[in-house]
Image (cartoon, rainbow, N blue to C red):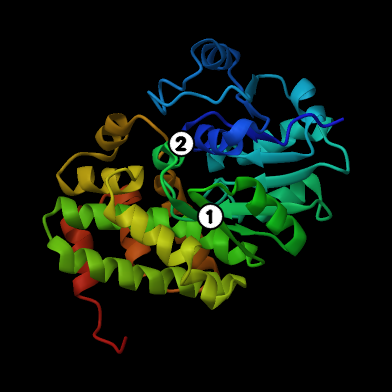
Amino acid sequence: MAVSEVLVLGAGSWGTALAIQLSREGRPAILWDHDPAQVERLARERVNARYLPGIPLPESLQLSADLGTAVPRVRDILVVVPSHAFRSVLQALVPHLTDAHRLQWATKGLETGTGKLLHQVVEEVLGAERTVAVVSGPTFAREVAEGLPTAITVASPDEAYARTVAQRLHSEAFRAYTSHDVIGVEVGGAVKNVLAIAAGIADGLGFGANARTALITRGLAEMMRLGLALGGQRETFMGLAGLGDLVLTCTDDQSRNRRLGLALGQGRSLQQALDSIDQVVEGVQTAREVHALAQRIGVEMPIAEQVYQVLYAGHTPHEAVHALLQREQKAE
């Protein structure tokens, strides 16, 4: 019998922040991590010192490194791991799931090596009949953990489940809107990371606010073209999971993707930039997958293309900017 509301998988910054949010006001939740030593530290110190230093874990938040004991205690599971680990975590869940378990994910990105949207991975691993939802939007983990005002989107083909997830996340400073456009929300959450690298590169080169705003605006057009081609809905990209998340990650240095772009624009190598951040930067791998996906389905994404060229083809940031500026003039 379930004794906790949600099991959160992944004790990084975002997983921990969502677990804190779900545990506010004494609500029971469980935070799982694959590393028993990390779980032991969290249990002993009651703070995630690496990812969210100084923010205490609520007393009602339980900790676990054992899926076999944690999964039977909940009905709802929220996956918050990097996209490259998403499939393997789902596969680890399989032996412990019943038909009653429902799945949410707050992971942003495309599957490494296949370019699949994450709901496609869920269907392959867990079947198409599972009740699911995706949580996305303009959110920095630390601000959520600190209880600062935040708004997100919860998308599910099951309208009632979207409302359930939104209501559970809701608090005085946390507002969740619902949607049924899973594809649009997933595309927005993935592509914005690539575009944030581009915005960071432009700022690292000293190009100023005009260039940054142009990149955000034309980047939104690219995101929308890809999303519509995959079956997303136009209005999604004008909302929190599209424009909102894009503006956030392109303009604030809490964004790891933006910081990576800044470092590249200032002359550091990709490895030097990654080493300085010392956390997963989703946009690096997503740039490769977006590039392949856009080519495969015939969608033009010039900004994302130039990010790929800088990360994987040896182009310099200046060469990427020149390629964009030399494109044929056209109507907006």
| Quarter placement of the C terminus | bottom left
**Furthest residue toward bottom:** 331
Residue 221 at x, y = what percent? 40, 74
Residue matched to label 1: 175
Q: Secondary structure at mark 1?
A: strand
Residue matched to label 2: 145
In the figure, 202 relative to 171: above or below? below
In the figure, 55 relative to 243: above or below? above
Residue 209 at x, y = what percent? 16, 64
**Furthest residue toward left:** 206
**In this rendering, position of residue 66 left or right of residue 306:** right
| Quarter placement of the N terminus | top right
Which one is earlier in the sequence, the residue at label 2 or at label 1?
Answer: 2
Amino acid under disc 2: Ala
Within 10 Å of disc 1 (Cα), the crowding (few <14, some 14-19, many 20+) is: some
**In this rendering, position of residue 195 left or right of residue 28:** left
Residue drawn at x 28%, y 55% is: 251
